[in-house]
Image: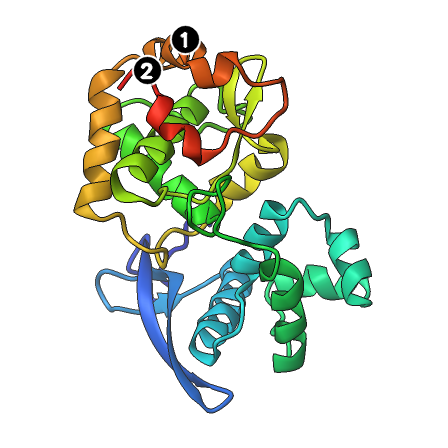
Amino acid sequence: MNALNCPKGHGPMAQKKIKKQKTFRGVDIEYNADAFICPECGLEAGTAQSAGDVQHAIADAYRKKAGLLTGQEIRSLRAAKELTQQQLADVMNVGIASIKRWETGMIQSKSMDHALRIQLQSAFRADSYTGNREISLPRIKLVAEAFERTLRKRLLKSGDKLLFLAKYLWYADMLAFRQLGKGLTGASYAAMTYGPQLNNYRELVKSIRESDVKDVELLSQEELRVIHQVAEKFPNKRQVYDAAHREKIWLESKTGALIPYSCANELTEF
């Protein structure tokens, strides 16, 4: 957002994120909005860009309150199922324009929301490849951010191929499954040339980076302990990379094959 000056002549206005309340379609909602505030007179102003962002925020706040999938949830679930917008449109028998609108702010009807859920959620099963948890791209980002804070290193970078982060995630998911009976993220992992990797990571990485973590299930103390355990074992990202390449699980898997969580007890580095 470009800087603004107070129209009353008080100089530059401060950019802030504020909570606002509104009744929308008969439902009381609360949403966040970016605005410029004059520190002297309190005048509030926005821009054309912020107006568009506000409309999206209002739409998603309403969808959450009404029990509908938000735009971010639709994008994340579609990416997790490896569907393009066109493929999702085809299986739902709607135009691709509808998918694009729902993902960028337009509110879908309850009947269309039900159809979306059938296509995006019905195939998820708690099985040996998801660690007894439905995949959550925002949770993958949450775990990645926890590793970044603990290690004091950037791991989830723009254009990154998750070469090192995927190893941290894999160990954390496997250890959580072994110790807690449930993985952290629901991600599935494949044995690739450069070690264990998020399955179909190329299609997921952008959506992971853009995921909104504010409403995702928080990490429990037990889950945080698993993350710290992995971080303490591998304070250097090269260490986690090399360790993953020593694992019997990876060495004995065919390239491209999924690595089941049931192999967690076979980890040799822990």
> Mark 2 or mark 1, which has the lower sequence index?
1
Question: Where does the image place residue 11, in percent across and percent down from the top left?
Answer: 31, 54
Residue 7 visible, this angle = no
- The percent position of residue 158, horizontal first and vertical second, equals 51, 29
Nearer-the-camera pick, 223 or 12: 223
Mark number, residue 268: 2
Judged left or right of residue 45, residue 110 is: right
Relative to 231, does residue 240 appear above or below in the rendering?
above
For the residues carrying marks 2 and 1, which lies nearer the camera in this image?
Answer: 2
Q: Residues within 10 Å of mark 1 (few under 14, many from 20)?
A: some
SS state under label 2: loop
What residue sits right under mark 1 in the picture?
246
**Where residue 69 appears, x then y in whole percent?**
54, 67
Q: Residue at coordinates 48% horizontally, 41% vertically from top-left?
A: 128
Could you tell whether 88 is left or right of 230 in the image? right
23 or 153: nearer the viewer:
153
Is 72 situated left or right of 266 in this image? right
- Camera-nearest residue between 220 and 103: 220
Q: Is residue 174 visible?
A: yes
Residue at the (22%, 39%) spot, across then down: 224
Image quarter where the C terminus lies is: top left
**Distance of mark 2 from mark 1, alpha carbons?**
8 Å
Q: Residue at x 62, y 74 (%)?
A: 114
Determine whether label 2 and label 1 are within 8 Å by CB: yes
Classify 212 as above or below 153.
Answer: below
What residue is rendered at 82% in x and 59% in y?
90
Circle 1: residue type = Arg
Label at residue 126:
none
Q: Amino acid at mark 2?
A: Thr
Q: Secondary structure at mark 1?
A: helix
